[in-house]
Image (cartoon, rainbow, N blue to C red):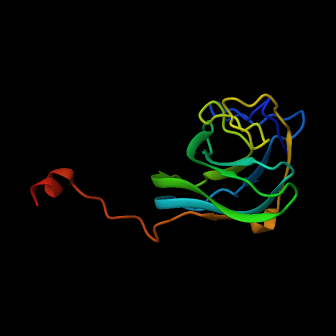
């Protein structure tokens, strides 16, 4: 895909365009056969290449419920500076999560070069994003076999509790 600071991936739009040049790597799970309780730190480990000296890597985890609209679950962004064209392994932290997902829910992991306007655009030159005079499009490659989503799933559903009883303990 190409990360272009002139047309950055928007942080406020979960729509995936069906036409035009690809602007992200998409990985989608099959529907979950059972409800999932996700609790803890989420991260993505991957091997990838950017063909510019500076590159942001944004990982966005999106919930795709069986009967509803896409919903952002977690996001993480890292800025990397490696020689252009060098494949590198790294981790993107997506923060903590506490969420119950219904059976039939799919997850979509998006790996992109921008998450704008929530995060400032990277000009991909190595210059300060606030003062950069030149913006470079950055060709990206992600090894899909290297992508590992570390997602903490509880082994069983917690027993229901009465909040009043919990408060009085």
The answer, for residue 11, to whether it is visible in the render is: yes
Q: Is residue 128 above or below residue 36?
A: above
Q: Position of residue 13 (x, y in %)?
A: 66, 31
84 or 3, which lies in front?
Answer: 84
* Frontmost residue, 93 versus 78: 78
The image quadrant that residue 30 belongs to is bottom right
Q: Is residue 147 visible?
A: no
Which residue is painted at 78% across and 42% down in the image?
Answer: 124
The single residue placed furthest to the left in the displayed view is 168
Please tell me which residue is depicted at 88% across the width and 57% down the height of the picture: 85
Total tally of numbered discs in the picture: 0
Percent across and percent down for residue 131 are: 69, 29
**Could you tell me residue 68's position as x and y percent?**
60, 37
**Residue drawn 63% across and 30% down?**
117
Picture coordinates of residue 133, whole percent (x, y): 78, 28
Q: Is 95 drawn above or below residue 143 in the view shown? A: above
Up the image or down, 128 lies above or below 101; here it is: above
Q: Answer above or below: position of 137 versus 164.
A: above
Q: Is residue 158 left or right of residue 104?
A: left
Quarter placement of the C terminus: bottom left
Q: Residue at x 52, y 52 (%)?
A: 102
């Amino acid at each position: 895909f190409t990360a272009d600071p002139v047309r950055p991936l928007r942080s406020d739009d979960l729509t995936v365009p069906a036409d035009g040049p690809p602007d992200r790597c998409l990985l989608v799970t099959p529907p979950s056969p059972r409800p999932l309780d996700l609790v803890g730190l989420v991260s993505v480990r991957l091997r990838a290449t950017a063909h510019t000296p500076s590159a942001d890597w944004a990982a966005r985890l999106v919930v795709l419920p069986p009967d509803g609209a896409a919903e952002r679950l977690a996001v993480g962004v890292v800025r990397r500076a490696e020689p252009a064209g060098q494949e590198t392994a790294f981790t993107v932290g997506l923060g903590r999560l506490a969420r119950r997902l219904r059976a039939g829910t799919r997850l979509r992991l998006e790996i992109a070069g921008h998450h704008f306007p929530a995060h400032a655009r990277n000009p991909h030159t190595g210059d300060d994003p606030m003062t950069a005079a030149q913006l470079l499009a950055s060709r990206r490659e992600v090894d899909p076999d290297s992508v590992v989503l570390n997602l903490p799933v509880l082994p069983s559903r917690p027993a229901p509790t009465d909040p009043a009883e919990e408060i009085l303990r």
